[in-house]
Image (spheres, grey):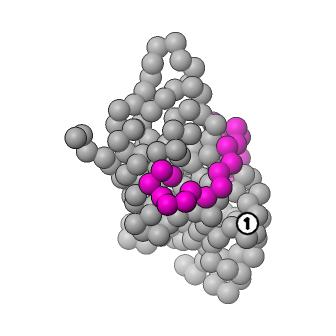
């Protein structure tokens, strides 16, 4: 699939599922922190984003504690983190809600990082990807685990043009940290 080459600049949507969370008793879902594995994996996700040149111009992050902590640990791996917008709508959002959030991105943003939750993120990736590279769609269909990163590219003059099936899923990776 040709994601409409020539129909505007190349844009990239990087989707990051929050790192592994803990389930402390008496803590509401929105307030759940990262667990030990999540605290190891989130910085690795940040390094992967930097090493593969997937750093965003803007990040939009769920307001949930585990998503915010993922952002903080991942972006601490970069020299200068981009602007971040914490958006309550990303928490518990479905694919349509997430697409609406992405479409609000200013036109000067070439790469957007969206940090949130499943099943909405997985649904968004599957909705937007008209085709893939190296079996990335199969990997997303199989599982989109915590700390997973999906990279979608497409051409468009504005983010409002982002539509189902218009993107090429160029990668799906799951960064994991190791116990010291």
Residue occupying the far front of the picture: 79
Residue 114 location (% of width, % of height):
60, 53
Q: In this view, does 10 lie to the left or right of 151?
A: right
Magenta highlight on residue 21: no
Farthest residue, direction top: 26
- Taking depth in this image into account, of 165 and 11 the one nearest to the observer is 11
Res. 9 visible in picture: yes
- The quarter of the image holding the N terminus is bottom right
Q: Which residue is drawn at 67% across and 80% down?
A: 9
Q: What stretch is highlighted in magenta?
A: 75-99
Residue 167 lies, with reference to residue 91, above or below; the image says below
In this view of the protein, which residue sits in the foreground, 63 or 161?
63
Q: Is residue 16 left or right of residue 5?
A: left
- Residue at the spot x=44%, y=63% of the render? 50
Vertical order, 63 against 110 (above or below):
above
Q: Relative to 125, does residue 52 appear above or below in the rendering?
A: below
Q: Name the residue under label 1.
A: 159
Query: Visible in this render: residue 142?
Result: no
Residue 163, how many percent across, how many down? Answer: 70, 64
Instruction: Say which quarter of the image contains residue 46.
Output: bottom left
- The structure residue drawn at horizontal position 56% and vertical position 32%, both measured from the top left corner, is 65
Quadrant for the C terminus, please: top left
| Residue 76 lies in the magenta stretch | yes
Residue 136, position as x, y percentages in the image: 42, 63
Q: Which residue is drawn at 40% across and 31% down?
A: 35
Q: In this view, does 68 lie above or below 109?
A: above
In the rendered image, the residue lying farthest to the left is: 180
Give residue 101's position: percent from left, percent from top.
Answer: 72, 52
Total labels drawn: 1
Secondary structure beneath dot 1 equals: helix
Callout 1 crowding tier (Cα within 10 Å): few <14, some 14–19, many ≥20: many
């Amino acid at each position: 699939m040709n994601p409409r080459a020539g129909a505007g600049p190349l844009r990239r949507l990087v989707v990051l599922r929050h790192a592994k969370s803990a389930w402390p008793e008496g803590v509401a879902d929105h307030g759940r922190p990262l667990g030990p594995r999540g605290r190891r994996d989130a910085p690795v996700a940040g390094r992967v984003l930097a090493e593969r040149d997937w750093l965003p111009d803007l990040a939009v992050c769920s307001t949930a504690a585990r998503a915010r902590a993922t952002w903080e640990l991942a972006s601490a791996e970069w020299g200068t983190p981009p602007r971040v917008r914490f958006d309550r709508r990303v928490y518990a959002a479905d694919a349509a809600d997430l697409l609406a959030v992405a479409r609000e991105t200013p036109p000067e943003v070439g790469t957007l990082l969206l940090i949130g939750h499943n099943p909405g993120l997985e649904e968004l990736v599957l909705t937007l990807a008209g085709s893939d590279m190296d079996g990335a769609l199969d990997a997303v269909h199989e599982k989109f685990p915590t700390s997973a990163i999906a990279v979608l590219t497409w051409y468009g003059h504005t983010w409002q043009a982002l539509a189902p099936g218009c993107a090429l899923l160029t990668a799906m990776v799951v960064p994991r940290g190791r116990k010291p």
